[in-house]
Every structure is written in structure tokens, then in C-alpha cells.
Amino acid sequence: TDAHFAEYEWALAQYFGYGVAPCWRGPRLYDSDSTRALVAKWVGFYKEHRAILTSDVVHLRPPDGRSVDGVLHVNAGLPATQGLAMLFNPTPHTISTVIKMPLYFT
């Protein structure tokens, strides 16, 4: 996975950022100290934000593979973080756009 470090981080960010708590098994979840630290980073992110990541999800727009994709995790009943947005650019290009966040539910 060191050869595809950026892609691995992108995948982990998507899984954990979308609130998916995957269970991976196998002999090579990480193959170096850098990929081990990467897995620890995103597992730590999920643990820190678990309450909001497992709450309701508002899809910001239908994904089309050509522009920014994202979700807004919402829960007005939480004491600290009532909203957490995760945005992803599925293209190899830089995208500059305005995205409306429906904060009503936060």
C-alpha cells in the first residue's frame, strides 16, 4: 500500500468520513510504518467523531463523478459537534465551487 499511499488515504477518508465502520481482516492492512500511521489517523478520526458520524446524513447533492460529492452528518442533540461535512473531489482536477450546507438540522 505504500506504492498507493494517496489512494489508500482517499479510500480510508471516504469510508470513515461517510460514517462507515468497516471491518477489514487480512495479513496486510498496512505494510509499513507510514501506512500503519495512516490507518491509525483515520481510525482515530472515526473514534473522535463517532457520535456525529453515526447520526443522520444529509446528502448535499447527487453524486455524478464530475464534481464535488459530499454529505453532512447532523445531530442537533449532541453537546459538541452538531454537524460535520465530508467533501470529496472524485476527479483528478482542482474544483472551485460553492456548496450550500443545509444547517437546519444541526
Image: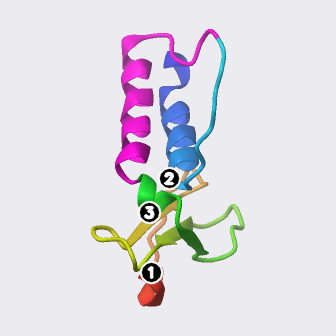
- Could you say which quadrant of the image residue 66 lies in? bottom right
- Write down the residue under mark 3: 52
Q: Earlier in the sequence, mark 1 or mark 2?
A: 2
**Quick one: SS at disc 2?**
helix
Q: Amino acid at mark 2?
A: Gly
Residue 31 within the magenta-colored segment of the rendering: yes
Q: Which mark is residue 106?
A: none
Q: Which mark is residue 17?
A: 2
In whole angstroms, how far apart are the C-alphas of marks 1 and 3? 24 Å
98 vs 21, left or right, is left
Along the line of sight, the residue nearer the viewer: 4 or 83: 83
Q: Locate residue 89, reporting x and y percent.
A: 54, 57
In whole angstroms, how far apart are the C-alphas of marks 2 and 3? 10 Å
- Could you say which quadrant of the image residue 42 lies in? top left
Q: Amino acid at mark 1?
A: Val
Along the line of sight, the residue nearer the viewer: 44 or 28: 44
Along the line of sight, the residue nearer the viewer: 95 or 102: 102
Q: Earlier in the sequence, mark 1 or mark 3?
A: 3
- Write down the residue under mark 1: 98
Q: Amino acid at mark 3?
A: Ile
Mark 2 crowd level (few <14, some 14–19, many ≥20, 10 Å Cα): many
Q: Farthest bottom residue?
A: 104
Q: Farthest left residue?
A: 80
**Quick one: SS at disc 1?**
loop
Mark 1 crowd level (few <14, some 14–19, many ≥20, 10 Å Cα): few
Q: Earlier in the sequence, mark 2 or mark 3?
A: 2
Residues shaded magenta = 27-49
- Say which quadrant the N terminus sits in: top right
**Quick one: SS at disc 3?**
helix
Residue 26 within the magenta-colored segment of the rendering: no
